[in-house]
Image (tube, rainbow, N blue to C red):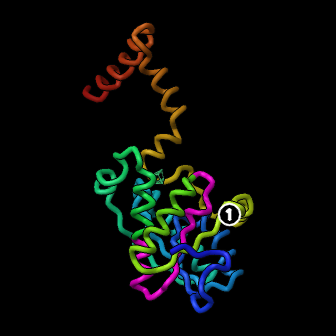
């Protein structure tokens, strides 16, 4: 079931807020607080790779919730190979990724006795907003809870400005290794053009191979 902006039953004031990162949590948390929701945060993001990045975002979320004195449930599940097999190597990987996180959030809300859940993924202008909304509602139906929908993107500028002002860790890519590659697309192309030019520019290629060979020789000597 979908509920939002005045659409939920009055006695349901507790909400589990799935938090993908600290930056995306600021505005939705503020909005829900203004509306009188009692928030419990939930961190479950096995899509964030590599581990050092996962740890950094997890600690940023933990610190954020600590600072606002709000409870946070952490599921620190991390398994890159499992994620790659089940999500990344798929042309609809983002939908699978939302599904993984939102179904788990709905299930967690249910197990905690919280009847409504939402997600900070609804804040990002870079995500597939409609897919998140649909999958959130589907997850809610599956687990017998409500999905709170609000278009948190309206607070994009406010939230991102606040994250800068408060010195909150701001990640440079969505999370999975494929999104990290997308971030560096141009840089990868530049590197490849420099070191591995096409057959027509065989001279550069020879030069690159020469560099690699001489390094290997140095190491073995
Ligand atoms: S780009 Fe983001 S939403 Fe899409 S699969 Fe990767 S981590 Fe998940």
Instruction: Give the vertical position of 54 relative to 76 (above or below).
Output: above
Residue 145: x, y in percent? 46, 80
Residue 11: x, y in percent? 59, 92
Q: 10 Å neighbourhood of mark 1: few (<14), some, or many (≥20)?
A: some
Tell me which residue sits at (39%, 20%) in the image. Answer: 211
Q: Toward which corner of the image does residue 107 lie, by quadrant?
A: bottom left
Q: How many marks?
A: 1
Q: Is residue 13 left or right of residue 204?
A: right
Find out whether residue 71 is within the magenta segment.
no
Q: Is residue 176 visible?
A: yes
Instruction: Give the vertical position of 10 relative to 60 (above or below).
Output: below
Q: Is residue 62 visible?
A: no
Tell me which residue sits at (52%, 61%) in the image. Answer: 132
Q: Is residue 42 left or right of residue 163?
A: left
Residue 178: x, y in percent? 43, 45
Asked whether mark 1 and ligand 1 are closer than 8 Å, the reply comes as no
From which residue to which does the magenta span run?
104-126
Q: Is residue 143 left or right of residue 21?
A: left
Tell me which residue sits at (51%, 78%) in the image. Answer: 146
Mark 1, residue position: 163
């Amino acid at each position: 079931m979908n509920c939002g902006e005045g659409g939920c039953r009055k006695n349901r004031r507790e909400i589990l807020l799935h938090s993908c990162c600290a930056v995306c949590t600021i505005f939705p948390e503020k909005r829900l607080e203004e509306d009188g929701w009692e928030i419990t945060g939930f961190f479950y993001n096995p899509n964030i790779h590599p581990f050092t990045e996962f740890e950094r975002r997890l600690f940023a979320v933990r610190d954020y919730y600590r600072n606002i004195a709000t409870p946070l449930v952490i599921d620190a599940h991390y398994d890159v190979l499992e994620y790659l097999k089940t999500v990344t190597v798929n042309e609809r990987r983002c939908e699978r990724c939302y599904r993984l996180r939102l179904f788990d959030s709905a299930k967690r809300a249910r197990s905690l006795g919280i009847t409504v859940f939402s997600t900070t993924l609804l804040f990002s202008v870079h995500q597939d907003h409609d897919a998140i909304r649909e999958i959130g509602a589907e997850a809610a139906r599956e687990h017998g809870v409500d999905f709170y929908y609000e278009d948190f993107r309206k607070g994009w500028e406010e939230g991102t400005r606040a994250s800068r002002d408060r010195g909150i860790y701001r990640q440079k890519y969505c999370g999975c290794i494929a999104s990290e590659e997308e971030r560096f697309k141009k840089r990868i192309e530049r590197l490849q053009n420099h070191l591995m030019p096409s057959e027509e520019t065989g001279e550069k290629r020879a030069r690159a191979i020469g560099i690699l060979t001489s390094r290997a020789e140095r190491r073995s000597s």
